[in-house]
Image (cartoon, rainbow, N blue to C red):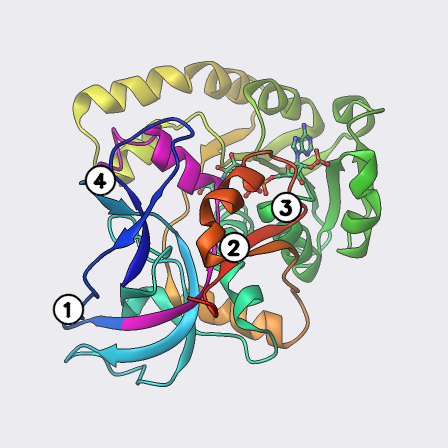
Amino acid sequence: MKAFILDRYRKKGALRFGDRQEPSPLPDDVVIAVRAAGLNQLDSKVRDGEFKLFLPYRMPLVLGHDVAGTVVRVGANVRRFQPGDEVYARPRDGRIGGFAEFIAVDEADVAHKPGNIGMEEAASLPLVALTAWQALVETATLKPGQKVLIHAGSGGVGTIAIQLAKHLGASVATTTSTANIDLVRSLGADVVIDYKTQAFEDVLSGYDVVLNSLDAKTLRKSLAVLKPGGKLISISGPPDPAFARTQRLNWGLRQVMRALSFGIRRKAKARRIDYSFLFMRADGEQLACIASLVEDGGIRPVLDRTFPFAQTNEAMAYLETGRAKGKVVVTLDDA
Ligand SMILES: NC(=O)c1ccc[n+]([C@@H]2O[C@H](COP(=O)([O-])OP(=O)(O)OC[C@H]3O[C@@H](n4cnc5c(N)ncnc54)[C@H](OP(=O)(O)O)[C@@H]3O)[C@@H](O)[C@H]2O)c1
């Protein structure tokens, strides 16, 4: 089969378009004929070697963390899926490989694709929707009437997080640039901060939750908008000791993560704010809940651009401009 392959970690390095053996399923796997694959900043970060200490991959590696497609084979233990099913998935860490014609995925990471959207839209959802779910439902336990600030509302995570927070009954503020104000309003944002002309920390106060996906400066400033007892959840770092424990990292790495997050944890504690770093995980059951939400109209995918599979490197470069409005997806219909 054809795939986009990483031969060694390299900053901004192009992926090699080459041949790989078609996967056979382990007993708990489904093999998916990929029809569309979503791109994520995580693909670029893995390629650049940024995560090699706690996500050590053996080369050559097929990148790609999001897929939608049709089941073509199932392993002996699989009960929930059969050939012909239309599914979507965020394959677990260690078993990624969506930039390929086929991928074997543990059935626990897979769900039936929402029936009211196409393959491209379905492939845009898993990683960012699971991130939003794990941040707002699991970590924040967001309640109706609470106030949440979602940074970068026009991005892959932001476009879904705004809609999920509204679905949960929260009041949502978001940051974006002038050009994307209408987009984030159309997704339900109640308060829009144009970061080109306003400083969010001067405008917002008394918030229950902040979801940060931006830099360390934004993270620090976000403390000022939270009320005591509020939650600061960051998906862009710094990693904290709790994350190191769940990843079962060695003692040395645990100390590194403790040190990296020491400053923000100390500042948060002084204000009685709970800081946590979230690194999303694969979860087929949550994806099934998200599929229901999409079918009920609670969440709609936001696609910025699709590229043909052959242009996966161009699609990566586009995503890496950091200006995407929603998601970037490659389609395999022409493969
Ligand atoms: N830890 C995890 O589990 C996890 C999961 C998912 C993502 N992430 C991380 O979260 C970050 C965001 O991911 P993503 O997929 O949402 O990225 P993305 O789709 O590439 O984000 C692009 C968006 O960010 C906006 N943006 C850029 N600078 C901004 C600023 N200063 N203020 C407000 N908005 C700004 C841009 O809007 P404008 O053009 O209007 O500026 C653009 O729409 C990445 O670092 C990613 O690696 C982590």
Q: Which mark is residue 334?
A: none
Q: Nearer the viewer, mark 4 or mark 2?
A: 4
Q: Which residue is mark 1?
A: 26
In what element is the residue under mark 4? loop
Q: Which residue is mark 3?
A: 158
In what element is the residue under mark 3? helix
Looking at the image, which residue is at 14% across and 73% down? 27
Q: Which residue is mark 4?
A: 57
Give, as a three-letter code, the residue at label 4: Tyr
Q: Nearer the viewer, mark 4 or mark 3?
A: 4
290 or 259: which is nearer to us?
290
Q: Which mark is first along the chain, 3 or 4?
A: 4
Give, as a three-letter code, the residue at label 3: Gly
Q: Is residue 71 left or right of residue 27?
A: right
Q: Which mark is first along the chain, 3 or 1?
A: 1
Give, as a three-letter code, the residue at label 2: Trp
Q: Which residues are magenta?
A: 31-57
The image quarter containing residue 219 is top right
Dot 3 crowding, Cα within 10 Å, few <14, some 14–19, many 20+: many
Label 3, ligand 1: CB separation under 8 Å: yes
Q: Nearer the viewer, mark 1 or mark 3?
A: 1
